[in-house]
Image (tube, coloured by chain):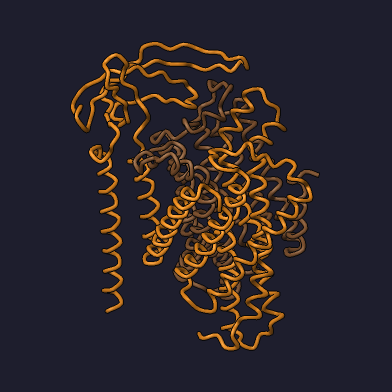
Amino acid sequence: MNTITVLGLVLFLLMTLVGGKTGATAFLSLIFNFGLLFFAVVLISWGFPPMGVTLVIGMIILAFTIFFGEDNELAAKPAYIAALIVMVGLILVIFPVEHWIMAQGFSLEDSEDLEGMSLSIGVSFVGVAVTEAVLSTLGAIAEAGIAIAAGLSEIIAQHPQVTTKRLYIDGISIGKQIIGTTFNTLFFGFFGGFLALFIWFASLHYSFGSVINNKIFVGEVLMILFSLIGVILTVPVTTWVMTLEHRKAGNEPKR
Amino acid sequence: MKQRIKQRRGWWLTLTVVILGLLAVGLTRVNAGWYRQTVAVVTHVQRENRTTTTDEFRNRDVSTTQRVTLRVLNHRQRGRVYHVKNVYTASGAMDQAYRRGNQVFIRIPSDHHSSVAIQGLKRDTALAFVVWLAAALLLLIMRFSGLMALLSVGLNAALFYAAIQIDLMTNGNHVYLLFGVLAIVFAALTLWLVLGWGRQMAVTFGATMAGTLCALVISLTVFALTHERGVTYESMQYVTQVPRPLFLVETILGSLGAVMDESTDIVASLFQLKRERPDIENGQVFKSGIQIGRSIMGPLINVLFLIFMAETFAMTLLYLRNGNNWGYTFTMNMSLGMVQSLISGIGIVLAIPVASWLASRLMPKEVAA
C-alpha cells in the first residue's frame, strides 16, 4: 500500500480511539476539506474566477470544519456566523494587499521546477494568490471561533443571567489565551514549511534586503500574517455575535 | 484610582508604539540609501502594444509591452533617468505590470552596450505595512501579553537563523541532531515565555516532546513498512541538501507549534480543574483531559492542513493547465504536504492522552491558587 494511505489509516484509527465519534467526524471533515481544496484548484483551472471560487469554497470549508468539529449547536452557529464575517473582512484586507505587493506566482528560485512548462496560462496569478491566502487562514479562524463560542456558551449555560458587558470581558480574556498559543502554531508551521527555502537563502548568501523583498518569502510571510490577523479579528467578532445571540435569547419569552 | 492611571498609561504606551510603527512603515518609502542594490522609482509608464498568445495546450493569454521611465534613487547614478521595456502577461506568473510610483530594484550594467534591467519590485513597504497591521491589532487586544508573544517570535527567529548557519558550516551532515536539538530548545523557550518555570511548564513540555516523538516513531515505522511509496522527495522545492532528512525535520518543526498549542490548552485546563476540585481523582483528571483534547484536535489538524496545502496552489494550477492529469498533479505537488499534514495530525492526536496522563500523574496534591 501507498504510504499516504497507511498514514491516513493510522490517523483515522488514532482519532477514533482518542476522540470516539467526534474524532471520526473530525477525520471525515479533513477528507472533505481536502476534496474541496483540490476542487477549488480544478475549478480555477477550468476558468472560474478565483474570487468567486474562494468565497464559495471558503464558506463550505468553514461549515465543514465548524459543524463537524463542534457538537454544541449553541456554540457552532455563532462561531460560523463570526467566521464568515471575519473571512469577508480578511478578503477586504488581502485583496488590496496582494495587488499592491505583487508576490504572486513564481520566482527565479522556482526555475528548475518550471522547466518545460508554459506559464502563459491565462489565469491571473494575483487572483490565485488571494485564494491561497484566504483559504490558508480558514483553519485558524475556525479554530479560534469554535474555542471562544464554546467557552462563552459554557459560561451562559452556567450563569444564564450574565450581563452582556461581562460576557464581552470573558470573551476577550479567552481570546487572549487562544491568540497566544495559535501564534505558535502558525509561526512554527511557517518555519517548518520553509526550512529548505531558508537554507537556500543562507547558502547562496542572500542579503537581508533581498530576502525581505523576495517574492516567495514575502508571499509566505503574508500568509502567516493574514492568518494571525484573522485569528485576532475572530476574538472580538465571535464575542460580539455571542452577545447578540445572548441578548436575543434573553428577550424571547421563556417557554 | 491608581489602577485607572496605570490602565491609561498602558493605553498611551500602546498608542505610541502603534504610531511609531506607522512612521517606520512610511520610512521604507525613503530607505533606498540602505540598499546595496540600485533602487529606482517609476515616474512614467506608457503602454506600447499587446498581443494575444496561445500555447500548445490552447491556453490564451495577453502579452503587453510597456515603456517604463525610471529615476534612480540611490548610489552614484542617483537622479539619472532610464527608459526600460517591460513585457508582462495577463496571468503574471513570473512578470508584472509596473505602475507610476512603484519602487523597483534595477541592474545598471557597467558597459554601455547592454541595457538596464528591472530585477524586481521593492516590496518592503507593503510587507512592513502588513507586519504593522498585525502587530498593532495584537497589541490593541492583548497589551502586555502581545509583547511577550512578539518577543517569543523574535527569539525563536534568532535561534532558527543560528541553526541554519551551523547547518551550512557542517554542510548539512548533522541535520537530525541539529534540528532535533533546535526543536527541544524552541519548545522549552516558548513554553517558558508563556507559562514561566514550574510544574505546569514541565508537564506541558514533557507532553509536547513525547507526543512528537511518538508520532515520529510511528511515521518512520510506516515509512519502512511501505518503502516510502508515494513520498515524492524529488518534488520538494528549493532543495540544496539531501531532501529526506530536510523533509522530516520540516515536518517535526511544523507540527511542534500545534502540539505545544494543544498541550498548553489541555494541561492548563486540568490544573484549573484541580484548583477548583482539589479532591478529584487521577482517573477523572485523565478522562477530562481526553474530553478537552477531543474537541481541539480536529480544528487544530485542519489549521496545519490548510496551511500546508494552500501553499501548493499556484504550482498545482500550473500543472493542471499544462495538460497533466489529476493523479500526477497531486503526486507532484500535494503529496508531500499531505504526508506532512498526516504526520502532524498523528502527533496532535497522540499528545492528548500523553498530556492527560502526565498531568494526572505529575500534578501536585495541592495546586496553589
Chain B's shade in the image? Answer: orange
Q: Is residue A132 left or right of residue A201?
A: right
Q: Is residue B61 left or right of residue B152?
A: right
Q: Position of residue B220 (x, y in %)?
A: 71, 54
Q: Is residue A109 left or right of residue B76?
A: right
Visible in this render: residue A145?
no
Q: Is residue A9 above or below residue B12?
A: above
Visible in this render: residue B242?
yes
The mark total stands at 0
Depth order, front residue of B271/A166: B271
Q: Residue at x 34, y 41 (%)?
A: A209
Q: Is residue A8 above or below residue B316?
A: below
Q: Residue at x 30, y 65 (%)?
A: B11
Q: Is residue A24 above or below residue B243?
A: below
Give the quarter of the image for residue B217. bottom right
Depth order, front residue of A192/B51: A192
Which quadrant: the N terminus of chain B? bottom left
Q: Is residue A74 above or below residue B327?
A: below
Depth order, front residue of B3/A105: A105
Q: Position of residue B137 (x, y in %)?
A: 39, 55
Q: Position of residue A3 (x, y in %)?
A: 75, 46
Give the quarter of the image for residue B338. top right
Depth order, front residue of B314/B118: B118
Chain A's shade in the image? Answer: brown
Q: Position of residue A8 (x, y in %)?
A: 74, 50
